Image: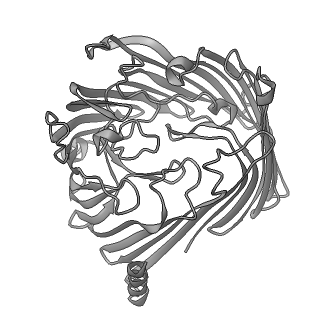
Amino acid sequence: MKRILLFLGIALGVTNSYSQIRVGFENNSQWYIDDKKIKLAPIEAEDRFRSNSYLKVDYDFKNWTFGTQLEGYAPKAMLNYSPDYDKVSIGTIYARYNNVEKGIDVTAGHFYDQFGSGLLFRAWEDKQLGVNNAIFGVNAKYSVDNWGKVTVFGGRQRVGMGFDLSKSFLFGADIGVSIDDLAGWDEHTLSLGASFLGRNFNKNDEYDDLDRFNSGYSFRADYAFKGFYIGAEYVTKASDCLVQNFMIDEGSKYDGNALLINTGFTQKGMSLDVNFRRIENMGIFSEREFLGNDYFKGIMNYVPALTKQYDYSLQNIYVYQAQSNIDLMAGKTGEIGGQFDFYYEFKKGTSLGGAYGMNLTVNGAYWAGLKSEVNFFEGDVSNEFIGFGEKYYRDLGFEVRKKWSKQWSSVFMYLNQFYNAPVLLGKMENINTNIVSAETTYQFLDDKSVRMELQHMWADADNKNWMAGTLEFALNSKWSFFGSDMYNYGNDDSDNKIHYYNFGASFTKGVTRVSAAYGRQRGGLMCVGGVCRYVTEAAGLTIGITTSF
């Protein structure tokens, strides 16, 4: 704490016309209660008030930036966050020199970065998910005009609070070349890239046969011409031991690989985007035994589920998680599949477009396990490169956005899902759902609006049918209020026919926002950007504050 105060004092003391100081603060707190339907586990009930706080300070001086993030999890981190997030301490601290004219960008301390799509390496922060896997070390970039960039880094990964670091030493390199800038092309764009990631583990006397070094490589290319684009990335990971239930099996070693292809086109009023991905054994962690933990501890790459990120609560009950690891007991060795997203705009003045136009989006996804032969007793795995095995997930959705007048607009959506619950959740039956959603917003008196949302899910298994609704009222540009409810009325167990209600308000002024809500949280997967974590059922009061200056 003394070091942070000294840093702030120096920064404020030298502020002048060449410098700038930026401060951001975020706090999320919860007071958990027990009600008739939802109760905390006894061990969690010992700390009913929990709070996560983040104070970020950045100081710019000419080509230099100095920054730190102070984190507080007191008296304890909110439910479902890593127990390694504890009390108050430095989360990140860094110094950066960035000279754009010379193409030099060097960071010492904690830093975030990403190679390609992130399938090989990504260090990032997401407070909602509880992810902060920054690297503590040195990250250096050198740019050559507009056509080339080289990145090299080395360090240890944050695996708890800011100075709780991995035992392994990590290093990587990335090179990207813009062929079109180098060649002076006007209409075509073509970029190529390659990456390397190395992990140097400490010697483990318990496992003599384990290699201390493991590496991975990726190669990528992106091309675009007018409205057409296509990109591909191939990633390979060197052979390493199998880890299951946090236990290392040094006698079973497998390599890993991934192929990602993205293509599509866009033109005025219409677009199509298509993704294909195949993944086999691509879990990459800074320590081998971290694989499979619930808190993203030690994760080094980014493997989001390539499905549409849906807006409505019932659409997010049965969400798909990417299956990137080998699990011999479950017969899983990876995944293969893809998604498409089609957008069409009906012009104003047409029979369907009407006076204000109408937008149609059609989205679908299909994911399966790799077609493989698995010998559980001998640990042998043989996968076809392009072969679809057991179906894991499928969805098909239609969304219509229609504006009726200057003040009134609506959204209608239908979603059909197949969910392989035995594989994905360990439950008994596959689940088929049909979900309809309708939303309408009416704005009046310039700064006031009302939004209403209704949803229904028909499901043939698990917890069966649901209904949900939301009502929001924006009093003005500062105050808004809402109430919502999800009701599992179709559950075969009457004790589990639960209303997950929430009521709340928010106040916004400039860059400051304060919110408060009271209600229940449904247990299950909570996802951000295709990455998910499990949350338990809970009830209580939630307060959030964000501001900056």
Quarter of the N terminus within the rendering: bottom left
Q: Quadrant of residue 431?
A: top right
Which color scheme did the rendering employ for the protein? one colour
Q: Is residue 176 above or below residue 330?
A: below
- The foreground one among 373 and 337 is 373
- The foreground one among 98 and 258 is 258
- The foreground one among 311 and 323 is 323
Count of marks placed on residues: 0
Give the residue at the far bottom of this rendering: 13
Asked whether residue 118 appears in the rendered view, the answer is: no
Residue 439 image point, x, y percent: 76, 36
Residue 308 shown left or right of residue 115 in the figure: right
Residue 309 shown left or right of residue 192 in the figure: right
Residue found at x 60% / y 14% = 429
Residue 455 image point, x, y percent: 76, 30
Residue 473 image point, x, y percent: 82, 52
Residue 137 shown left or right of residue 449 in the figure: left
Residue 430 image point, x, y percent: 59, 14
Q: Is residue 290 above or below residue 15?
A: above
Asked whether residue 167 appears in the rendered view, the answer is: yes
Residue found at x 45% / y 12% = 390
Residue found at x 78% / y 39% = 37
Quarter of the C terminus within the rendering: bottom right
Give the residue at the far right of this rendering: 445
Q: Is residue 310 above or below residue 425?
A: below
